[in-house]
Image: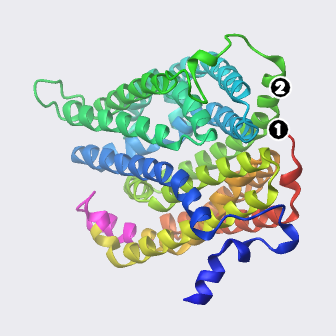
Amino acid sequence: MAFLRRLYAPEFLVPDSKRQGELPKTSSAYGSVVRLAWPALTEMVLVTMINMVDTMMVSVLGHRAIAAVGVVHQPRFVVLAAFMAIGTSVTAIVARRRGEKNSQGANDCMLNGFAISAVLAIVISAASYIFARQFLYMAGANNEIIDDATAYFRFLLIGIPFNALALIITAAQRGAGNTKISMQINLLANLVNVVFNYLLIEGKFGFPRLEVSGAAIATTIGYTVAFFAALLSLKKPEGFLSIYKIKFKLDRAILKTIYKIGSSAAVEQLCVRIGFLLYARLVAGLGTESLATHQICLNLNFFFAIAAGFEIAATTLVGQNLGAKRVDLATLYIKVCQRVALCITSGIAILYILTGRSLISMFSGEQSIISLGATILIIMAATSPFQVSQVIISGSLRGAGDTKFVAAVSFISIMALRPVVAWFLAYPLGLGLVGAWLSMTIDILIRIALTYARMHTGKWTKIKV
């Protein structure tokens, strides 16, 4: 036990030669991570649970309905890619300004990111609405599910502008260290989503039975609620981020900084989304049953939710400590985030290996889906330690502004290699959906090797934001 305590102590994690000042005590270091991570972690786990409940509610309509909703997953994220890139930039910049104690600079950054996103949201949503059917065919939808998938996608697109703008505000709040606000907003939006799912999918309490379209309308109502809740989070005049501190004008220097970080983040998102879209198309080609199983397993991927929660904490702490000129603390918190996340995921991995069939049976009674899904969960559990570490390191590099490197890694591994490996394993080797998920494992191993090597070069500590 004494050895383990030393292994997790700040003095062990940061060598004497790298220290720039006094290190926090073990309780303080881990407490700082937990204070930031638990709201983000709760938020991500709740989002995953809501998606899981969403799928369970849709599953009463049959596995074709699950497949129709599932095939929209990647196109939706393609539409959101630009806003996720801007959000990455806003989080990194606001975190630096927080470290510098520059509240006005943080508010100016948030406004400029919001303004760009408002224009883009209208244009991208309108174009996607018009070409929704063609977009979904590209994503792998077949004639069996295309009508339901198109209706679902178009109703979602109506709410995308609200979703995009809420995303920018919550990204700024995370950068400022206000992860509880983001959690509360998403919790409220997802509860609204579940309530309207219940009312609209099967038509309860006098509401119309809208089936798959009802699920999309419920999500859009949730997006709208999230947007107004995000605006309300800025109402306090004394807050670090406050509507009272916003100067309603665009600033060329801020836009240039957002572009500097955001352009690389946009390339990363583009590579990720194209890679995931190609991957989803390959999975869809395996048949409606495989696509439904794939969607069920994605909704059970709590490992990514945990990793994303600690990624947010790492991004914020890295940005803030680099802003305060404490590279040693930035490095320390990356390692602390990894250790805490790995402890949590280890327990869940064991649970998935032991209870996989029972978990899948919550979504479907078809034995072929249960057997295949249980195998996928074992692969997911075995990959989880590498996935968690990779996500946290990538988030840390983004928090430092090193988005170009993360984009390059995404291009090599997700866009170029994963679809090719997935095709080879799934089709020529005949491994089907199992092969597709094994390709994801290979992709994660490549990315963790590259990002871990980058972290140890220290180049990310010298980027000016």
**Residue that appears at 46% across and 43% down:** 71
Q: Which residue is mark 2?
A: 256
Residue holding disc 1: 465
Residue type, mark 2 in image:
Lys
Residues at marks 2 and 1, CA–CA distance in whole angstroms: 11 Å
**Left or right of 220, for residue 393:** right
Query: Which SS type dominates the magenta stretch?
Result: helix
Number of other residues with Cα within 10 Å of mark 2, as a class: few under 14, some 14 to 19, many 20 or more:
few
Front: mark 2 or 1 = 1
**Left or right placement of residue 233 versus residue 370 in this view:** right
Q: Position of residue 377 (x, y in %)?
A: 43, 69
Can you see residue 213?
yes
> Which one is in front, 308 or 283?
308
Vertically, is 288 above or below 464? Answer: below
Marks 2 and 1 in Cβ contact (< 8 Å): no
Q: Quadrant of the C terminus?
A: top right
Q: Is residue 250 above or below residue 73?
A: above
Residue 67 counted in the magenta span: no
Q: Check the image and report above or below for 328 versus 160.
A: below
Q: Is residue 439 visible?
A: no
- The residue shown at (50%, 59%) is 306
Q: Quadrant of the N terminus?
A: bottom right
Which residue occupies 55% across, 61% down?
31
Q: Residue at x 58, y 33 (%)?
A: 80
Label 1: state its secondary structure: loop
Q: Which residues are magenta?
A: 359-375
